[in-house]
Amino acid sequence: MTLSILDLAPITSGGTAGDALRNTIDLAVRAERYGYRRYWLAEHHFAPGVASSAPAVLIALVAAATSTIRVGSGAVQLGHQTPLAVVEQFGLIDALYPGRVDLGIGRSGQRRAEATRVEPAPVEPAPARVVDGLLIPKPFDWSQLAKHPHLAHYATLLQQPGAQTPDFADQIDDVLAFLAGTHSAHAVPGEGADLEVWLLGSSGGQSAQVAGERGLPFAANYHVSPSSVLEAVEAYREAFKPSAALAEPYVIVSADVLVADDEPTAARLGKGYDLWVRSIRTGAGAMPYPTPEEADAHVWTEADRELVKDRIDTRFTGTPEQVAEGLRVLRRVTGADELLVTTITHEHEDRVRSFELLADAWNRP
């Protein structure tokens, strides 16, 4: 199976964090039955609509409820933790569930801190274009979000006072050294753990470069930053050097999807998505996922629409056949070895049904 799942443990309007976590565990059990290859949990903070704030804890719970599907992080924000802490956490899970754990690592924590210190240079955005059937939208302008007053405050809460995050490449080298037992200190548990180490990235920047240079598998982010997915996979492949982990580059590409039995149902179930993305893009943090009726009640401005346009236009929504075909285009254009799909609906059973329909359509000859 070349499809895997990314889950944020979404909290829905009227629901609780406990509901979200129970739904995540239930979905993981069913995803294993449907044949998905991996089940990754995200790391998000200060988001009223996301319960996945401690992926290692949630991964352990999912691993305990399943038996064969790989479980992992998509991704641990290394800017908020030390390499030792991360290796110990994932080494502990591996000790109980050996050979099933993926340690996905991202730079989000570092970028959050950098954004509060550095004024980004103005750049003329590239226009939207279609590459061999795949929409590459105009880039989203992150500069206004980076200036949000909450951002600097959150950065201080995610680290100890006065803490300085080392260079990302140095942190990755520490992670690999702890796992290999070549560090000056020994991680227990962790040393010798049978983990797959992945790096996740949204551009052709440091994450892609380090993943390639260290010979690690790489996850490129089409669902959050669709405008830069091609440059991300290209930079990774150009930088790739064979390693003990990989002889050749290996890429997974993420995508937002929503599948239903027919187009009208998919359109109705998908109504809350644009409002949910708007809550993220305005700096408020992901809101509890709204009902279709709550989404209908929102009065949209042109500025609102522009804020979410790239995400709406690149979400794969529709019947199983329509979504599967769209994902095949994404795989072909990016050269992805796997796809990592994420789906959010207000009702849990609608989300489960979406993954069931997609797995069936994807596996059809």
Image (cartoon, grey):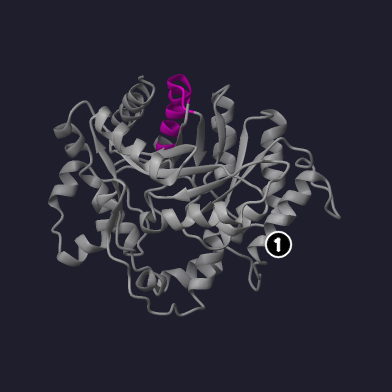
Location of residue 127 by image quarter: bottom left
Residue 143 at x, y percent in the picture: 38, 73
Q: Residue 52 at x, y = what percent?
A: 48, 45
What residue sits 78% from the left and 51% below the top? Answer: 177
Q: Main secondary structure of the magenta part?
A: helix
Decide which of 240, 168 is in the foreground and name it: 240
Q: Is residue 167 left or right of residue 330?
A: right
Q: Is residue 10 visible?
A: no
**Residue 83 visible somewhere in the drawing:** yes
**Residue 28: in magenta span:** yes
Q: Which residue is mark 1?
A: 170
Task: Count neighbours of disc 1 (C-alpha within 10 A) and say few if under 14, some if 14 to 19, many if 20 or more.
Answer: few
Considering the image in quadrants, where does the C terminus appear?
top left
Image x and y of residue 119, in percent: 45, 80
* Quadrant in which residue 362 is drawn: top left
In-image side of 161 versus 306 (left or right): right
Q: Disc 1 marks which amino acid? A: Asp
Q: Residue at x 60, y 61 (%)?
A: 79
Residues rendered magenta in the picture: 20-36
Q: Nearer the viewer, residue 275 or 243?
A: 243
